[in-house]
């Protein structure tokens, strides 16, 4: 167990380093944007004002409020202190709403949509891939071309196609939003039903794309393992096919778990775009609003949250992986 | 080399992918020769004209020859188009609401239906309907007034001196013109987009630009990845540690987030297609670095490399002559994947509104973005977005097929 603790601490240290790095990038990159966003807000607020000293006073007041009058480094440390307290500053585009407030209303939608979808897609994809690899002849001829083609439709393309077919043509599901526009979020039966109905299309569009990619990966992994020497040896020994397959798929699964850890960032990126297509009230949509409104406090906070989500997911997968992969266990025992 | 190429072209998957890609490239090269003009020229006044052949009405009236064709179903077609089933049902609804017994109305007997309609319809009667519905019936009434007449339409011109209208000709219901004799006919196979631009012309140009973006980004990413991977793998030591530290950092931080942050910080004005390509290239080299490094590490201690070292060759010589040839196939595969993922990355960025600035060139992502902003998918204007999705899917599909084919050639365990 000592070896595992070392592995765990090593991963934890990495999580910490990457978090700091991501935080710094998240702060500085959007603030390098040319143009003065405060001037834009003041311009909007001070419409019709002719008194230049008054305008200047308003500008200075807002520059102070957003903290852009201080040097960048000083702003950074103030930001760090505030973020630790859960304060991400004020939004530019939805002024005077705090960024933390906007994010807290969207983050649950994203987590509730993306993680189940990615997990379900991953599981179904792996099962299909394994079946395709084992049954080479029949299923493989169907599953493979279909999954290759499906995985090549971009995530947003899948979202648009599903939307056009099931929401616009067949009218089975609503076209946009996370719940009926005439409802106020509460725990009534009507609201839950509306959320469920709105959930289906974004969910399945993410699942379908994930299935394709995972099935292809699992298939080639399984084929690789099925041809390995230990399988041939086991066959010569007369071990039952069923037992061999259990070993084979367990070994083929392991790289797939690392694959999930590595591809989760890309998947989340694709799913964010799917959210935008469905106007789902999650982080993707918030990000779009931030971009449209040139709102860098909102952008850097939402990308920071997305990064943290991906990093944490990665960390958890690696920790689980360390527990189940015999090779890592063996390396730790030395 | 020749042998390898022959082997590669024996792989069915590679050849299939290669053919799709070549077909796309030919389309990009040949189409502009036939359809000249600016791909971003706004030709349609209005949004989303459906696909089809557009014949100039003015020119068809003044076509050199008018032919008389007595076609049996012409009248029926005309009525069916001007008074579709849905409108007839609506007429029935109005008449029933007005008080005509339902069994007297037969929506399939158009002549009887029109007789009852003209006898009873009163545009001023609201029947408790909302205003929009009333207006709908008024418009319907106007459009079907002359439906059953067999008279032609009289063409009149204004006399420049007196200002009076003078009859100059008549267009009979049996008059036809040959489309080849009409001066102005424009085929819009994919209709127009939200700005009134020809979608097909725009799509061809956008595909070219997107492929360029993919190529530039892919080459940059592969070059960076190759250099770093070779250095880390071959030199090892602290160089390896340092490069791997940076690589691991960028592996876990989603490149999508970096792309958003960098494109945003560049600002709308300075974002051209090439800038976006460079940014994508700079954020996607990580995979190539990791893969090249692990390949080089396994090659580093091979006998022929040691022999080369003993012969006193420089590091540069060893890398280019003793290591690179062994990983070349891998690098080509990585490049293909980088190109296709860069095209996807551009499309995703553009949908977020962070793509190339919209004034100079179309890209596949921008076309998608415009279609989404103007709600083409909700209004059922499939020609504005479906060809774009299919084009992106075709490009990535062809490249992935080529890649799988190459993989099977260079990785014998995967062969069927």
Image (cartoon, rainbow, N blue to C red):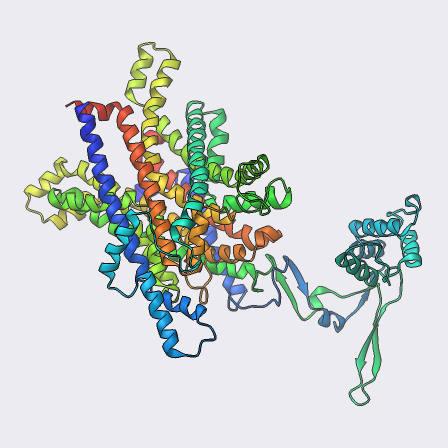
Q: Nearer the viewer, residue B227 or B11?
A: B227
Q: Residue at x 54, y 39 (%)?
A: A195
Q: Is residue A241 left or right of residue B362?
A: left
* Residue sitting at x 41%, y 52%: B343
Residue at image point 82% right, 77% down: B156
Q: Quadrant of residue B245?
A: top left
Q: Quadrant of the C terminus of chain B?
A: top left
Q: Residue at x 17, y 24 (%)?
A: A2
Q: Residue furthest top?
A: A238
Is residue A285 toward the left or the right of residue B317 in the image? right
Q: How many marks?
A: 0
Question: Toward the viewer: A285 or B283?
Answer: A285
Q: Position of residue B162 (x, y in %)?
A: 82, 89
Where residue A61 sits, quadrant-wise, is bottom left
Q: Is residue A182 above or below residue A135?
A: below
| The N terminus of chain B lies in quadrant | top left
**Position in image of residue A324 (x %, y %):** 29, 24
Q: Is residue A227 visible to us here? A: no
Q: Position of residue B332 (x, y in %)?
A: 31, 46
Q: Nearer the viewer, residue A122 or B39?
A: A122
Residue sticking out furthest to the bottom: B161
B403 lies above or below A69 = above
Q: Give the x, y percent position of residue A18.
A: 25, 44
**Image height of B196 relative to B346, above or below:** below
Is any part of residue B98 visible from this angle? yes
């Amino acid at each position: 167990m000592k070896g595992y603790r070392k592995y765990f601490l090593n991963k934890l240290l990495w999580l910490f380093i990457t978090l700091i790095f991501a935080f710094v990038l998240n702060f500085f990159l959007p603030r390098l944007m040319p143009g003065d966003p405060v001037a834009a807000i003041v311009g909007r607020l001070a419409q019709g004002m002719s008194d230049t000293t008054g305008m200047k006073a308003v500008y200075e007041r807002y520059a102070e409020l957003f903290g852009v009058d201080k040097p960048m480094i000083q702003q950074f440390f103030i930001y760090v202190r505030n973020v630790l307290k859960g304060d991400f500053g004020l939004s530019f585009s939805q002024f005077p709403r705090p960024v933390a407030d906007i994010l807290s209303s969207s983050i649950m939608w994203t987590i509730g949509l993306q993680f189940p979808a990615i997990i379900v897609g991953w599981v179904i994809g792996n099962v299909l891939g394994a079946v395709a690899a084992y049954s080479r002849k029949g299923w493989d001829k169907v599953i493979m071309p279909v999954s290759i083609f499906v995985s090549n439709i971009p995530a947003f393309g899948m979202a648009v196609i599903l939307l056009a077919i099931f929401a616009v043509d067949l009218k089975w599901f609503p076209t946009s939003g996370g719940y009926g526009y005439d409802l106020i979020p509460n725990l009534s039966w009507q609201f839950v039903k509306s959320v469920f109905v709105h959930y289906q299309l974004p969910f399945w569009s993410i699942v379908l794309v994930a299935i394709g990619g995972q099935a292809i990966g699992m298939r080639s992994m399984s084929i690789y393992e099925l041809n390995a020497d230990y399988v041939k040896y086991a066959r010569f020994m007369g071990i039952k096919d069923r037992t061999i397959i259990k070993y084979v798929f367990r070994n083929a699964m392991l790289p797939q778990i690392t694959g999930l850890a590595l591809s989760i960032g890309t998947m989340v990126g694709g799913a964010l775009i799917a959210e935008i297509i469905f106007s789902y009230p999650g982080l993707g949509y918030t990000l779009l609003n931030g971009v449209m409104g040139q709102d860098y406090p909102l952008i850097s906070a939402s990308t920071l949250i997305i990064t943290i989500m991906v990093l944490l997911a990665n960390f958890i997968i690696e920790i689980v992986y360390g527990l189940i992969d015999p090779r890592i266990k063996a390396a730790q025992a030395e | 080399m020749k042998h390898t190429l022959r082997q590669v072209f024996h792989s069915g998957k590679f050849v299939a992918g290669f053919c799709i890609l070549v077909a796309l490239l030919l389309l990009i090269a040949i189409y502009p020769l036939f359809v000249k003009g600016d791909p971003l020229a706004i030709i349609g006044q209005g949004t989303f004209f459906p696909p089809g052949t557009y014949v100039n009405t003015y020119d068809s009236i003044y076509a050199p020859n008018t032919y008389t064709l007595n076609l049996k179903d012409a009248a029926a077609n005309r009525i069916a188009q001007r008074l579709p089933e849905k409108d007839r049902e609506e007429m029935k609804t109005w008449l029933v609401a007005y008080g005509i017994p339902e069994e007297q109305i037969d929506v399939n007997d158009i002549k009887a239906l029109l007789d009852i309609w003209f006898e009873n319809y009163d545009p001023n009667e609201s029947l408790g309907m909302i205003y929009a519905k009333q207006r709908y019936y008024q418009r319907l009434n106007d459009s079907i007034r002359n439906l059953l007449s067999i008279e032609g339409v009289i063409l009149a011109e204004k006399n420049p001196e007196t200002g009076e209208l003078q009859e100059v000709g008549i267009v009979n219901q049996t008059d036809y013109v040959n489309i080849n004799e009409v001066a102005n006919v424009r085929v819009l196979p994919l209709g127009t987009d939200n700005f009134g631009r020809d979608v097909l012309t725009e799509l061809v140009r956008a595909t070219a630009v997107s492929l360029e973006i993919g190529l530039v980004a892919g080459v940059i990413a592969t070059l960076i990845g190759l250099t770093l991977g070779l250095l880390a793998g071959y030199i090892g030591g602290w160089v390896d540690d340092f490069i791997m530290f940076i690589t691991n950092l960028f592996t876990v931080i989603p490149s999508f987030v970096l792309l958003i942050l960098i494109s945003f910080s560049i600002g709308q004005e300075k974002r051209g297609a090439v800038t976006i390509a460079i940014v994508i290239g700079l954020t996607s080299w990580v995979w190539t670095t990791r893969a090249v490094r692990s390949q080089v590490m396994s090659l580093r201690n091979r006998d022929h490399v040691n022999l080369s070292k003993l012969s006193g060759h420089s590091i540069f010589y060893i890398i280019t002559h003793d290591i690179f040839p062994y990983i070349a196939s891998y690098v080509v595969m990585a490049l293909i994947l980088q190109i296709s993922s860069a095209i996807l990355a551009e499309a995703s960025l553009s949908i977020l509104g962070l793509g190339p600035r919209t004034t100079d060139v179309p890209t596949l992502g921008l076309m998608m973005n415009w279609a989404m902003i103007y709600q083409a998918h909700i209004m059922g204007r499939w020609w504005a977005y479906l060809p774009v999705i299919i084009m992106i899917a075709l490009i990535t599909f062809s490249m992935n097929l080529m890649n799988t084919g190459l993989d099977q050639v260079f990785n014998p365990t995967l062969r069927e």
